Amino acid sequence: DQARRYKINGYKLASSLQHLKYGLAIYMRNELSNYIELPPTEDGRTTTTSIKLGTLTIVNVYKPPESWPKPALQKPNHLTIYVRDFNSHHTDWGYKVSDANGEALTYWMSAEDVHLVFDAKHHGTFWSTRHTREYNSDLILVSTDRDGVPIRASRHVFPVFPHSQHKPVIIHVGIEILMMVVKRVPRCNLGKVAWDSFEAKMEKIRGIPPTPKNYDCFVVLLISAGKNNIPRGHRKGYIPCWTLNCKNLQQYEQSEDPAAASAQLNTLDAARRQRWIECVESLDFTHSSHRAWGLKRKLGAANPVVAPDVKVKPNAIAAYLVANSKGLLNKQYKQEVKHQLRKVMTACPESSTLSTLFSSKELATILTAMKKGKVTDKDGIPPDFLHHLGPRTRKWLLDLWNSLFFKESVPLSM
C-alpha cells in the first residue's frame, strides 16, 4: 500500500513514518542501493527517520510546536546531517527574537559540536499565508569529522512549491569547487594591438577620394586593418585561486582518497584567504574610494539603488518623436535656410572660423581629446583606432571634414 500511495517516478521509498497529522519520508534514487534504513523514533515531541548512506547518516527531523526534550536530538556518533522542520526561533537563522525552543536547540548544537548551514541572503524556507512573510523553520545541521571540521555542505532555496507553504531546498554535500563559467564571446584586446602594422596598412589608403559617399569604404578599411592586427579571444573557464599545488585533485578523482581532497581544499582556502587579505589591505578611502565602494556593493552591504518611478517611459517618448517626425517636408523653408547659410558664410571676414578650412592642428587636438577605451559610435570605429592614424590617413580625414562642411551633407553611417 505504501509503494502504491507514495510512489515517485525514479525514486524508491527508503524510510517513512506515518501519522494522523504529519508524516516523514526519505526517498532514494533507484540506482542507489548501498544504504541502510535505521529505526525511526517518536516520543510525542520529536519524530525522526534516518538512513545511513556510506559513511554519512541523514536524519529527517520533525518537531511539532512543543518544547524540545532533553537532549534535543540523538548524539551524532559519526558524520550526520539533520534536516527538515525544527519549529524553533532564533536570531542565528533569521528570526527577530529567540524563543525557548531556539535556545534549547542552540545549546544542544554547542554541546554536541553541531553546526548550522545557513545564509542570511537566501529566502526563507517557509511562507506563512497567515502572516504573509517568510520564516526559516526548515534547518540544516551538520556534525564534524575527526579533525573537528564541519561537513562541507551548502544549500539553495527554491521558490514556493505548489500546494505547500514549505519551499524545496537543495543541499550539496561534499567537495564543491566553484567553477567560473564565462560566456565565450570573442573580444578585442586593445592592449596588445600591433599599432605599427595597423598604421602602415592604413597609410596605403589611395584611390579613394575624401568625399561623403566614400566614408563607408573608409570605415570598412579601418575596421579591416584593426581586425588583422588585434588579437581576439575569449576568457576561459577557471577556478578562483587555482595554483600549481592544486593538481592533487586529479589524484582524488582517481583514488577517491579523502586525505587528498582535504589537502586540495585546504590549499584553495589558504590561497583565497591570502587574496582576501591582500584585497582588503589594498583598499584606500583617502585618494580613491571607487574600488572600496565597489567591493562593498559586491558583498551586498550597500543600499540597493532604487530606480525612480518615472511616469513618462522612454518608449512613449520615442513613439511621440516618430509620430511627429513624419510630417511633410517644407522644401521652400529648407531652401531658405540654405540660402541664409550661404549668405552668412559669404559675408564672413577672412579671419572668421566660418570662412576658413579646418587645419591639421585642430584635427590633432580633437583626436587627442578623445578618450580611449570607450564604446564605438554608430559607425563602429573604436576611438583607439583614430588615435593611431598616420599622416596620410589624417590628411584624408581632414579633407573629408572640410568637404562635409562646405557641401553641407553628412553620411548616414556617421
Image (spheres, helix red, strand yellow):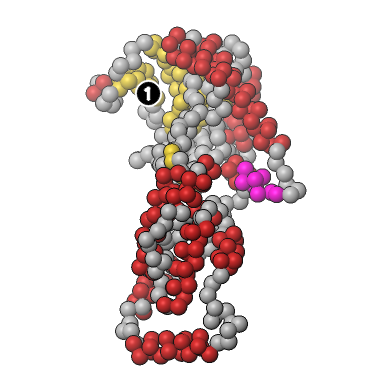
Q: Using residue 330 as the reference point, say whether residue 69 is left or right of it.
A: right
Residue bearing mark 1: 25
Q: Position of residue 406 (x, y in %)?
A: 45, 78
Q: Using residue 219 as the reference point, say whether residue 301 is left or right of it.
A: right
> Mainly helix, strand or loop, the magenta region?
helix
Q: Position of residue 155 (x, y in %)?
A: 48, 30
Q: Quadrant of residue 241?
A: top right
Above or below residue 160? Residue 269 is above
Above or below residue 237? Residue 185 is below
Mark 1: secondary structure: strand
Q: Residue lying furthest right in this view?
A: 286
Q: Quadrant of residue 28?
A: top left
Q: Using residue 127 as the reference point, say whether residue 289 is left or right of it.
A: right
* Along the line of sight, the residue nearer the viewer: 386 or 265: 386
Q: Residue at x 45, y 22 (%)?
A: 60
* Along the line of sight, the residue nearer the viewer: 178 or 171: 178
The answer, for residue 135, to whether it is visible in the render is: no
Q: Residue at x 59, y 10 (%)?
A: 146
Q: Residue at x 63, y 39 (%)?
A: 97
How packed is label 1: few (under 14 Cα within 10 Å), some, or many (20 or more)?
Answer: some
* Along the line of sight, the residue nearer the viewer: 341 or 250: 341
Mark 1 residue type: Ala
Q: Position of residue 48 (x, y in %)?
A: 45, 20
Above or below residue 364? Residue 192 is above
Magenta residues? Answer: 288-295
Q: Is residue 148 magenta?
A: no
Count of numbered tags: 1
Q: Position of residue 9 (x, y in %)?
A: 26, 26
The answer, for residue 244, to whether it is visible in the render is: yes
Q: Residue at x 66, y 28 (%)?
A: 274
Q: Quadrant of the N terminus?
A: top left
Q: Quadrant of the C terminus?
A: bottom left
